[in-house]
Image (spheres, rainbow, N blue to C red):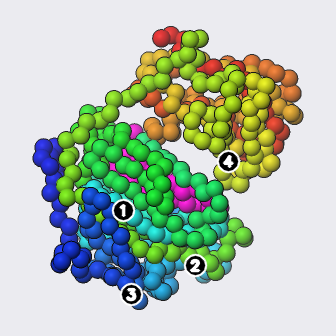
Amino acid sequence: MGKNVKRKIGLCFGALLIGGIVCGFNSHREVPSYDGYTLLWNDEFDGNSLNTNLWNYEPHEPGWTNEELQEYTTSNNNVMVKDGKLIIKAIKTKDNSGNNYYTSGKITTKNKKDFTYGKVVVSAKVPRGKGLWPAIWMMPTDEGLYGQWPKCGEIDIMEVLGNQLNTSYGTIHYGEPHAQQQGTYVLTNGTFADDFHEFSVEWEPGEMRFYVDGTLYKTINDWFTAKEGEEEEPYPAPFNQPFFLQLNLAVGGTWPGNPDDSTDFNHADFEVKYVRVYQKPYYDPNVKKPEKEFREPDSTGNYIVNGSFKEYENLSDEKNWTFLTTQNGRGDASIQDNTLKIYSQAEGDVDYSIQLVQPNLPMRKGTRYRLSFDACASHNRDIIVCVSAPTNGWIRYLKDTKQSLTTNWQTYSYEFDVSGKDDPNGRVEFNLGHRGSTAAVSLRNVRLVAVNQ
């Protein structure tokens, strides 16, 4: 599809319709319909081998991307269809030198089932174990149309880390420089390894909506792409071209870390019950990029909401202050007596294993800001403070700054300048993980003000 289409797009559904029944697909499992959508293609995995009319094997050597450890193979030991399920299995062996060697599987629909816009629904069950990284994701058929990754765009419908099994991530990558937007869905009971769950994205010209088990958890309608030194491509580029679907199980890598002795490769199976892709009869590409909304400061000039901690907040939601743990970090936080207190039970593996954040902070080009707060700790310890850009490639407006806290209240203040594009979604972070201490930290009077506006 061209970059400047000015008409409504009629879509070919690639399936034979007879009497309202979609023919030519697996039919042992009932396939539901959705209002406004028609089934484009599906795989119910009710055969005894991978349907190569739909799927390609994509072999790769170890270390191909993200410092991952696995070799992707075409072996039936790594990719199989059995008992009504696709199984992608990670296998641990030894190489000729006696070192650990991992194989796994990656399959794609490239040049077989590519499509532009639609609703993708996948039922899957993930493996448990540190270093295991299953994914359901999409890439453009022609990566060169807008330029190589990330300019070409990427849609991640589901990623789950094998040591953080209650959380699913939905993400889009795009832009130059690299930018991303990500939502998380956290189970209140059980894990994504206990049973099958349904992961879905609805991809339209001006919006993407991410779901788990039919519950909407992230809507994205603001993205861009550009080649270095050139103007941005017309919105909604790069997500206005054919994409294909991918399923894989990675081992290790920069995000999940490497497996350890606790990882059970006898049960390292990523199971998929079905893949279903639907489309609407047409999509109108003539969409307008939403105007950026910038938060206004309060009467004192403070852009931080509830920086005085006078109001009670649910710290587990994504409104205003949010407390997060990941990668073996364990802790909790509470607001009392105009103070936010963070308690750590385990410091975790990375600095953001224990984290307090507030997003949606306006970062205006050419503006100088001052971040200040009062803090103390139950014992002397360090924390990491920064102002980051979660939707702008995770750059740092205020660089990661180590701050030593004592048992006495002290005031800390930092100034920083913003260059580059305006960003309505800066994020202040207090990172307590992986600092060699689980001492409790108390915060009050958090302020972010513009000093030269």
Q: Residue at x 33, y 82 (%)?
A: 27
Residue 231: say if magenta: no
Task: Give the residue type that dot 4 points to.
Answer: Thr
Give the spatial CA distance, label 1 vs label 2: 29 Å
State yes or no: discs 4 and 1 in contact (Cβ < 8 Å): no
> In the picture shown, does residue 343 fall above or below 279?
above
Question: What residue does disc 3 label?
Answer: 47
Residue 161: say if magenta: yes
Q: Residue at x 30, y 39 (%)?
A: 226
Q: Secondary structure at mark 4?
A: strand
Select label 3 or label 2 by which is in front: 3
Q: Quadrant of residue 314?
A: top right
Q: Secondary structure at mark 2?
A: strand
- Mark identifier at residue 120: 1
The magenta segment is 149-178
Question: What residue does disc 2 label?
Answer: 91
Q: Secondary structure at mark 3?
A: loop
**Which of the marked residues, 3 or 2, is nearer the chain's N terminus?**
3
Q: Residue at x 51, y 75 (%)?
A: 271
> In the picture shown, does residue 261 fall above or below 363?
below
